[in-house]
Image (spheres, helix red, strand yellow):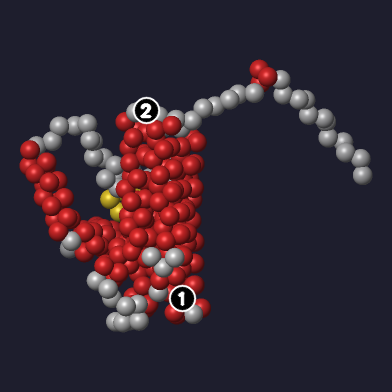
Amino acid sequence: MPDYRAPRKPLINSEIRRRGIYLLPNLFTTAALFAGFYAIVQAMNQRYENAAVAIVIAMVLDGLDGRVARLTHTQSEFGAEYDSLSDMVCFGAAPALIMYEWALKDLGRFGWIAAFVYCVGAALRLARFNTNIDVVDKRFFQGLPSPAAAALIAGFLWIASDNKIPVSAYGIPWIAAFVTLYTGITMVTNIPFYSFKDINLRRSVPFAVILLVVLAFVLVSTDPPLVLFLLFVGYGVSGYAYWLWRLRRRRPA
């Protein structure tokens, strides 16, 4: 069958537009991606505590790359796409695989289904975030953000490993399945979660705020797995608490 399409004209050098990328924010994104990949490797080697810590480190680095880009005015479309792909590895595939290798594989078919629900929930959450970024309230996330979901899973694994709790004890696989399903489903809900994006780091603050930050560091240093896990749990349920409080305010007396 003949091809009736017009031949394409070759591009001349003046029509080729080369775009550079900003190094500093993408270094943070690359470091977060490395932490997510390292977490998967450690889980394959059955070093689950190291995998959990790597996920937490990836969460911290992911929170820094965007702020660094805004503070240095180095935002770019490439950085946004790269960050989204990194998030899918660090907070989508890695937590699902780690949780499956640690506890969910003992549940058979239900275990890998729970892991897949989390993985697809993270993918849908990131896709919705990228498409709705210009139309939603910047103060709140629509659904549980994927870094917080991954941190909740990593925190649960970390506290169990730190206390030497065997996977076969206390129904750990079923608790792990509940946490995995809860985070996976909550990511695709419309429950609002505070985003902390309205906090201006360049604005002066009272001395008491600095004192609270120091106390927070001291509190975390006393027992990092326990304190961080409680913080992750608190944030993981805060959206539902805020949603119920707002729903109650709308009801007529």
Comparing 172 with 81, the one in front is 172
Q: Residue at x 37, y 28 (%)?
A: 73
Q: Picture coordinates of residue 163 (x, y %)?
A: 24, 71
State the count of labels.
Answer: 2
Q: Work out which quarter of the rendered image holds the N terminus and state it.
A: top right
Say whether residue 7 is left or right of residue 169. right
Q: Picture coordinates of residue 102 (x, y %)?
A: 40, 71
Q: Earlier in the sequence, mark 2 or mark 1?
A: 2
Q: Which residue is mark 1?
A: 105
Mark 1: few, some, or many residues within 10 Å (few <14, many ≥20)?
some
Q: Residue at x 44, y 30 (%)?
A: 22
Q: Picture coordinates of residue 114 (x, y %)?
A: 45, 71
Q: Residue at x 30, y 54 (%)?
A: 193
- Label 2 sits on what residue type? His
Quarter-of-image position of residue 251 = bottom left
113 in relation to 252, above or below: below
